[in-house]
Amino acid sequence: SNGPRLNTDGDSAGSLQFDNFTDIDHNKEVGGRVALMPLPELEIGYSVQYSQMQATNASANQADLLVQGVDGSYNHDFDWLKGSLDARAEWVWSQVSRLTYDPNGEMGFGPLTFDNRRTGGYAQLAYRPYKVKLPIIDKIELVGRYDRIDQPNEAPGAFDERRWSFGLNYWLGDSTVIKAAFETGNRSSADNRHEDVKAFLLQAAMGF
Protein backbone atom coordinates (compact mmCIF):
# COMPACT_ATOMS: atom_id res chain seq x y z
CA SER A 1 0.00 0.00 0.00
CA ASN A 2 1.05 3.64 -0.20
CA GLY A 3 0.63 4.22 3.52
CA PRO A 4 3.31 3.85 6.23
CA ARG A 5 6.34 1.72 5.35
CA LEU A 6 7.89 -0.75 7.82
CA ASN A 7 11.66 -0.57 8.23
CA THR A 8 13.24 -4.00 8.68
CA ASP A 9 16.98 -3.34 8.50
CA GLY A 10 19.70 -2.50 11.00
CA ASP A 11 19.28 0.42 13.36
CA SER A 12 15.73 1.19 12.17
CA ALA A 13 14.12 -2.28 12.33
CA GLY A 14 10.50 -2.02 13.46
CA SER A 15 10.14 1.73 12.94
CA LEU A 16 7.73 3.36 10.49
CA GLN A 17 8.35 5.72 7.60
CA PHE A 18 5.56 7.90 6.21
CA ASP A 19 7.27 8.88 2.94
CA ASN A 20 5.86 5.98 0.91
CA PHE A 21 3.82 7.34 -2.01
CA THR A 22 3.97 4.29 -4.32
CA ASP A 23 1.45 1.43 -4.13
CA ILE A 24 3.62 -1.70 -4.33
CA ASP A 25 1.25 -4.45 -3.13
CA HIS A 26 -2.30 -3.16 -3.78
CA ASN A 27 -3.24 -3.38 -0.09
CA LYS A 28 -5.33 -0.44 1.08
CA GLU A 29 -5.25 1.32 4.40
CA VAL A 30 -8.49 2.36 6.02
CA GLY A 31 -9.17 4.85 8.75
CA GLY A 32 -11.15 7.81 9.88
CA ARG A 33 -11.93 10.27 12.63
CA VAL A 34 -15.05 11.05 14.63
CA ALA A 35 -15.48 14.13 16.79
CA LEU A 36 -17.91 15.54 19.32
CA MET A 37 -18.53 19.20 20.13
CA PRO A 38 -20.26 19.29 23.55
CA LEU A 39 -19.63 23.05 23.56
CA PRO A 40 -19.19 25.38 20.57
CA GLU A 41 -15.60 26.08 21.63
CA LEU A 42 -14.70 22.48 22.59
CA GLU A 43 -13.99 19.56 20.22
CA ILE A 44 -13.01 16.02 21.25
CA GLY A 45 -11.97 13.48 18.62
CA TYR A 46 -10.93 9.87 18.11
CA SER A 47 -9.06 8.61 15.05
CA VAL A 48 -8.01 5.15 13.87
CA GLN A 49 -6.03 3.75 10.94
CA TYR A 50 -5.39 0.15 9.92
CA SER A 51 -3.07 -1.04 7.17
CA GLN A 52 -1.05 -4.04 6.03
CA MET A 53 2.59 -3.35 5.24
CA GLN A 54 5.03 -5.39 3.23
CA ALA A 55 7.89 -6.84 5.30
CA THR A 56 11.22 -8.16 4.06
CA ASN A 57 14.03 -9.79 6.04
CA ALA A 58 11.46 -10.75 8.70
CA SER A 59 9.61 -13.81 9.95
CA ALA A 60 6.50 -12.87 7.90
CA ASN A 61 5.97 -11.21 4.53
CA GLN A 62 3.42 -8.73 5.89
CA ALA A 63 2.83 -6.83 9.09
CA ASP A 64 -0.40 -5.34 10.45
CA LEU A 65 -0.41 -1.77 11.73
CA LEU A 66 -3.05 -0.23 13.96
CA VAL A 67 -2.73 3.43 14.91
CA GLN A 68 -5.19 5.13 17.25
CA GLY A 69 -5.39 8.61 18.67
CA VAL A 70 -7.47 10.89 20.84
CA ASP A 71 -7.38 14.66 20.57
CA GLY A 72 -9.04 17.71 21.98
CA SER A 73 -9.12 21.44 21.35
CA TYR A 74 -10.61 24.39 23.20
CA ASN A 75 -10.66 28.00 22.01
CA HIS A 76 -12.47 30.80 23.78
CA ASP A 77 -12.35 34.57 24.17
CA PHE A 78 -12.15 35.96 27.71
CA ASP A 79 -12.87 39.61 28.36
CA TRP A 80 -11.04 39.52 31.69
CA LEU A 81 -7.92 38.23 29.91
CA LYS A 82 -8.27 40.77 27.10
CA GLY A 83 -7.81 38.00 24.57
CA SER A 84 -8.21 34.33 23.73
CA LEU A 85 -6.95 31.02 25.06
CA ASP A 86 -6.31 28.14 22.69
CA ALA A 87 -5.66 24.72 24.27
CA ARG A 88 -4.84 21.61 22.24
CA ALA A 89 -3.78 18.09 23.14
CA GLU A 90 -3.34 14.76 21.37
CA TRP A 91 -2.22 11.25 22.35
CA VAL A 92 -1.40 8.60 19.73
CA TRP A 93 -0.47 4.93 20.12
CA SER A 94 0.54 2.38 17.49
CA GLN A 95 0.86 -1.40 17.38
CA VAL A 96 2.79 -3.36 14.73
CA SER A 97 2.64 -7.14 14.41
CA ARG A 98 5.20 -8.98 16.52
CA LEU A 99 7.86 -10.06 14.01
CA THR A 100 11.35 -11.44 14.17
CA TYR A 101 13.72 -9.21 12.22
CA ASP A 102 16.78 -10.70 10.50
CA PRO A 103 15.60 -14.21 11.54
CA ASN A 104 18.60 -15.97 9.96
CA GLY A 105 21.22 -13.49 11.17
CA GLU A 106 22.19 -12.61 7.61
CA MET A 107 22.12 -8.87 8.28
CA GLY A 108 24.25 -9.15 11.39
CA PHE A 109 21.83 -7.77 13.99
CA GLY A 110 19.30 -10.60 14.49
CA PRO A 111 17.37 -12.58 15.15
CA LEU A 112 15.55 -9.80 16.97
CA THR A 113 11.98 -9.96 18.35
CA PHE A 114 10.17 -7.36 20.42
CA ASP A 115 6.70 -6.02 21.20
CA ASN A 116 6.42 -3.11 18.77
CA ARG A 117 4.21 -0.60 20.60
CA ARG A 118 4.93 3.12 20.45
CA THR A 119 3.15 6.06 22.08
CA GLY A 120 3.44 9.81 21.92
CA GLY A 121 1.57 13.04 22.31
CA TYR A 122 1.56 16.69 23.20
CA ALA A 123 -0.31 19.37 25.14
CA GLN A 124 -0.22 23.03 24.13
CA LEU A 125 -1.61 26.28 25.51
CA ALA A 126 -1.58 29.61 23.68
CA TYR A 127 -2.67 33.08 24.81
CA ARG A 128 -3.27 35.96 22.39
CA PRO A 129 -4.03 39.36 23.99
CA TYR A 130 -5.52 40.84 20.84
CA LYS A 131 -8.01 42.96 22.81
CA VAL A 132 -5.19 44.98 24.36
CA LYS A 133 -5.14 47.89 21.97
CA LEU A 134 -1.47 48.67 22.19
CA PRO A 135 1.07 48.54 19.35
CA ILE A 136 2.77 45.14 19.03
CA ILE A 137 1.01 43.71 22.12
CA ASP A 138 -2.24 43.10 20.25
CA LYS A 139 -0.37 41.11 17.58
CA ILE A 140 1.65 38.71 19.74
CA GLU A 141 0.79 35.24 20.97
CA LEU A 142 2.46 33.35 23.83
CA VAL A 143 2.72 29.57 23.42
CA GLY A 144 3.78 26.77 25.76
CA ARG A 145 3.98 23.13 24.70
CA TYR A 146 4.95 19.77 26.20
CA ASP A 147 5.50 16.70 24.04
CA ARG A 148 6.86 13.19 24.53
CA ILE A 149 7.49 9.94 22.69
CA ASP A 150 7.99 6.44 24.13
CA GLN A 151 9.46 3.63 22.05
CA PRO A 152 10.07 -0.08 22.86
CA ASN A 153 13.36 -0.53 24.72
CA GLU A 154 14.37 -3.56 22.63
CA ALA A 155 13.98 -1.78 19.28
CA PRO A 156 17.23 -0.77 17.54
CA GLY A 157 17.98 2.91 17.93
CA ALA A 158 14.89 3.44 20.09
CA PHE A 159 14.72 6.27 22.62
CA ASP A 160 12.27 8.09 24.87
CA GLU A 161 12.12 11.85 24.65
CA ARG A 162 10.52 14.66 26.68
CA ARG A 163 10.49 18.28 25.52
CA TRP A 164 9.21 21.65 26.67
CA SER A 165 8.79 24.45 24.15
CA PHE A 166 8.21 28.16 24.81
CA GLY A 167 7.35 30.37 21.89
CA LEU A 168 6.37 33.85 20.81
CA ASN A 169 4.30 34.38 17.68
CA TYR A 170 3.86 37.71 15.94
CA TRP A 171 0.79 37.97 13.69
CA LEU A 172 1.31 40.21 10.69
CA GLY A 173 -2.24 39.45 9.51
CA ASP A 174 -5.08 37.00 10.04
CA SER A 175 -3.18 34.22 8.25
CA THR A 176 0.45 35.38 8.31
CA VAL A 177 2.67 34.76 11.33
CA ILE A 178 6.32 34.78 12.37
CA LYS A 179 7.20 32.25 15.08
CA ALA A 180 10.19 32.07 17.43
CA ALA A 181 10.61 29.32 20.03
CA PHE A 182 13.06 27.71 22.44
CA GLU A 183 12.98 23.96 23.07
CA THR A 184 14.54 22.11 25.99
CA GLY A 185 14.28 18.51 27.12
CA ASN A 186 16.07 15.20 27.32
CA ARG A 187 16.39 11.95 25.39
CA SER A 188 17.17 8.58 26.95
CA SER A 189 17.73 5.05 25.63
CA ALA A 190 17.60 1.54 27.09
CA ASP A 191 21.41 1.37 27.45
CA ASN A 192 21.33 4.31 29.91
CA ARG A 193 22.50 6.92 27.43
CA HIS A 194 21.08 10.36 28.21
CA GLU A 195 21.22 13.44 26.06
CA ASP A 196 19.99 16.97 26.64
CA VAL A 197 17.93 18.45 23.82
CA LYS A 198 18.01 22.19 23.18
CA ALA A 199 17.04 24.14 20.08
CA PHE A 200 16.07 27.60 18.87
CA LEU A 201 13.43 27.70 16.13
CA LEU A 202 12.39 30.48 13.78
CA GLN A 203 9.55 30.04 11.28
CA ALA A 204 7.28 32.08 9.02
CA ALA A 205 3.91 30.79 7.84
CA MET A 206 1.20 32.06 5.52
CA GLY A 207 -2.26 30.61 4.96
CA PHE A 208 -4.52 30.91 1.96
Image (cartoon, helix red, strand yellow):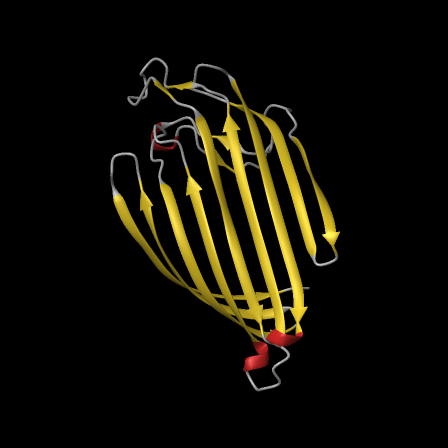
Q: Toward which corner of the image does residue 115 lie, by quadrant?
A: top left
Residue lying farthest to the bottom in this orientation: 134
x%, y% of residue 170? 54, 74
Residue lying farthest to the front in this orientation: 80
x%, y% of residue 120? 48, 42
Total count of labels: 0
Q: Which quadrant would the N terminus be assigned to in this image?
A: top right
Q: Residue at x 57, y 33 (%)?
A: 67
Q: Which residue is drawn at 60% across and 74% down?
A: 81
Q: Viewed as shown, does residue 169 lie left or right of 110? A: right
x%, y% of residue 59? 44, 14
x%, y% of residue 30? 67, 31
The correct choice, above or below, for 60 with respect to 21 in the image is above
Most foreground residue, 152 or 40: 40
Most foreground residue, 106 or 166: 166
Q: Residue at x 49, y 22 (%)?
A: 55
Q: Viewed as shown, does residue 49 lie left or right of 204? A: right
Most foreground residue, 75 or 109: 75
The correct choice, above or below, for 24 with respect to 84 in the image is above
Q: Which quadrant would the C terminus be assigned to in this image?
A: bottom right
Most foreground residue, 101 or 166: 166
Q: Which residue is drawn at 52% across and 33% down?
A: 94
Residue lying farthest to the left in this orientation: 192
